[in-house]
Amino acid sequence: MHADTKQLKRYLLGDLPEREADAIDLQIITDENLCEDISLAESNLIEDFLEGALSADEERLFRSNFMTSDARREQLREIDLIKKVARSQAAQKKQSEVQIAPPAGFFDLVKTYLRPLALGAAVVALLVVGLFWFGYLGGSSSALEKQYAELNKKDLGNPSDLTVYSNISLVPGNFRGSDSAVKQNEDKLTDTVLFRLTLPSKVDGSTYKARVLRGSSTVFTLEAAKVYQNSGGQDVRVLLPKSILQKGQYQIKLESQSGAEAGTFAFVIE
Amino acid sequence: MKNSYELGQDQFDALLGLFSADRDEAGEKYEQIRRGLVRFFQFKGCQDPDTLADDTINRVALKAADFDPSKNIKPVSYVYGFASNVFLEHRRTANRETSLGETQFRSPENNTNDEPDDMKTGCLNECLEKLPFDDRTLIVDYYSLEGRKKIELRREMCERFHCSATALHTKVFRMRAGLRGCITECVKKSS
């Protein structure tokens, strides 16, 4: 029988009845596997202390019964430092995060379509939809990947050509919590969706392999996504079919052609 | 077998006899129990778990000849009885030393001032940069939030990596160990 989290917290604080504490003591001596659970409980307790989440009694016990060795004092300093730096980096990342551009309104779209250049793009979009249906009815996802590989060979450098697509802009990073993850409503997506993936600094390459993952499963692969210059640096632009995006959490992983990871981009379809 | 030289051969034989009649098996069990004792003192927050484990083993060895197997007491429980006493004595001594004026650890507001904070922060940033991108993201994410949001984020991370909270923490714990070494090197170079 393994102790639960609350019981381990009380054990570490020296706040368990003697009989229960004895049972855990004996488990520690005989069961090496319990170490990882207690190590987690130790870290959680330190974090609770640093976050001011302990009650007055718990804080008193923390000081008198837990913080009793140099190893634990060092652990507290280490976690405190990492938390401060992590919070600071997360705040910087959030500040620089480009928000999703909302899809244009109806009249804006009408105006856009009246422009000859954009009209051309609209025709391309219709072709894409046609190709998508062709691939879909053919029942082969690799056919769809091939069609989109062709589509992504086009120059996506001219912003006015891209207004026909719903646009999701992402910066590298994993999910930061349900409140802060980049989200897009499924109903607002066009049949082809443009993803702009901001490249971290110090990455090389003119094309990248892009893999779209839902959970741990790869749902779509694009072998050669192109890099474009923007005012702030570089981004990779990828056109993807809406059909692969159902409600859920996704990641796009970029890899250089040599196989080196260039970034992971997370988003949620609602 | 650390500190066994302090025991006579008879005492050491009696100690091994506690664990098994077979000498090899007894040796293995002895090592397992010693490692268990080190863990016990470590998780009790003792300053020097190895020394206290050896102290316990020595005390057990001195009394091992008195162990009565007919009383149906498991050897590990017998050893634990000694370990508890060693721990209580250690805690009394440690409390006395603390009350004599040993420095208490400080509150979270000012507990990181032993070394220049900027230097360590700079070194940590530098060391994080050296991590593979996904590892860096993982550890920064893991420690970026507080309270309920932190709990939710870690739950999401567990779901995404298909692992338990313990396994996720173990991964982060190992990364921290790597960062610790890197920061120590960096601080040495910088000072």
Image (spheres, rainbow, N blue to C red):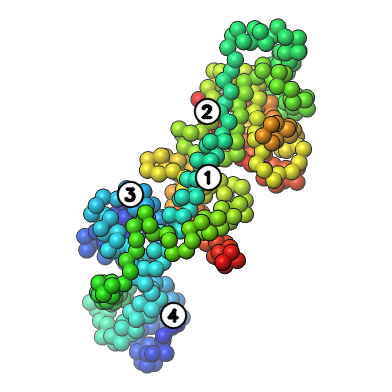
Residues marked 2 and 1 touching at CB (< 8 Å): no
Residue occupying the point 46% across, 50% down: A84
Q: Are marks 1 and 3 on the same chain?
A: yes
**Image quadrant in which you'd find residue A224:** top right
Percent across and percent down for residue B1 are 45, 82
> How many other residues sit within 10 Å of disc 4, few (<14), some (14-19) or many (≥20)?
some
How far separated are the C-alphas under marks 4 and 2?
Answer: 59 Å
Q: Position of residue B108 (x, y in %)?
A: 36, 55
Q: Disc 4 marks which residue?
A: B27
Q: Chain of mark 2?
A: A
Label 2 and label 3 in one chain: yes
Where residue A214 sits in the image (x, y, percent)?
Answer: 57, 34
- The kind of residue tagged 4 is Gly
**A130 sits left or right of A31 in the view:** right
Distance of label 2 from label 3 (alpha carbons):
32 Å
According to the picture, the residue beneath numbered tag 1 turns out to be: A89
- Looking at the picture, which amino acid does disc 3 mark? Gly
Nearer mark to the viewer, of 3 and 4: 3
Circle 1 sits in a helix, a strand or a loop, which is it?
helix
